[in-house]
Image: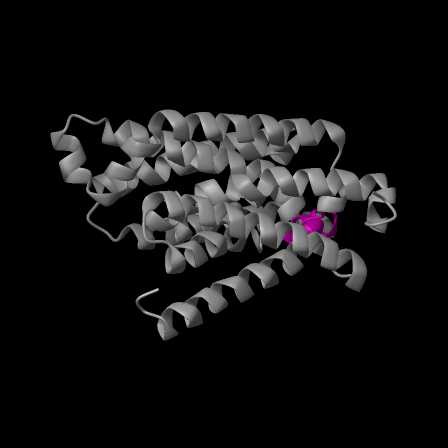
Amino acid sequence: MSSIFPFLRYDFMVLALLAVLIISPLFGMLGTMIVTRRMAFFSDALGHSALTGIAVGVVCGITDTTISMIIFAIVFALLLNEIGRRTMVSHDTIISVFSSASLAIGLAILSRGGNFSKYSSLLVGDILSITRREIVYLLVILIVTMGFFMVFGNKLMAVSLNAPLARSRALPVGLLENLFSVLVALVVTLSIKWVGILIINALLILPAAASANMSSNVREYHFMSILFSLFSGLSGLILSYYVNVATGPMIVIIAAVIYFGTYVYTRKNPNA
């Protein structure tokens, strides 16, 4: 196998490949619901809040910043949901205010004494540095996500398409929204280190958006999103090895090319 794919001779590339095989379908599944629910700005805010989660950990003396990131992201997501339900102000405005404030606080704390440089790698991520233990963490969250979609997928889709109708059918709209927001928070925070704060939202949105251009039903929508995400992840990892660029941005570039390709195709073939 290593003679056909020479990069597999290196352990870090094998681990990165396994990570991509886990992260890509994970993002593909979540991305469809994020696009359907118009939560692109929400997931982007969660990514930016990672710095604040780290800052909270530093202030509280928590050595494992992943724990503080997860806790802060969950609280952040639930708080946004609750305020969004209680105010008449645009949800996007609320997200922007909270995202900007939390990001500024995080940057201010982490940059004290000129120490931000040791956190700068989180901006673009480094999937080549992933360890076997972290692969297991990603696998667990993939299994949890698959279980969530098997149990709540149809109900959440009903809530996303028509919340008032879902309430009339006695569906727990608020609970489903909170559960999905917590799931997105977990996936985003657990993937930040390897994907990067600046581009994680693109990896969530682009495959699903490309799938929306091509699919004619919900099943195709989910399947093609996962397919586009896997293709972008694998080809981005391999190309980044040969052209010696960061893996995350290369994956995003390929995902963007797929999106624009599907957009042009559907414009030229509206009945396809």
Quadrant of the rendered image containing residue 141: top right
| Residue at (86, 50) in percent of width and height | 6
Please state which of residues 245 and 76 is positioned toward the viewer in this rendering.
Answer: 245
Please state which of residues 139 and 38 is positioned toward the viewer in this rendering.
Answer: 139
Q: Is residue 131 left or right of residue 258?
A: right
Quadrant of the rendered image containing residue 169: top left
Q: Is residue 101 left or right of residue 151?
A: right
| Residue at (47, 29) in percent of width and height | 146
Residue 147 place in picture, x, y as percent:
45, 25
Q: Is residue 167 magenta?
A: no
Q: What's drawn in magenta, residue-wise?
A: 116-126
Residue 78 place in picture, x, y as percent:
37, 34
Give the main secondary structure, helix, strand or loop, of the magenta stretch: helix
Please state which of residues 113 and 248 is positioned toward the viewer in this rendering.
Answer: 248
Please state which of residues 88 and 205 is positioned toward the viewer in this rendering.
Answer: 205
Colour scheme: one colour
Q: Is residue 83 left or right of residue 74?
A: left
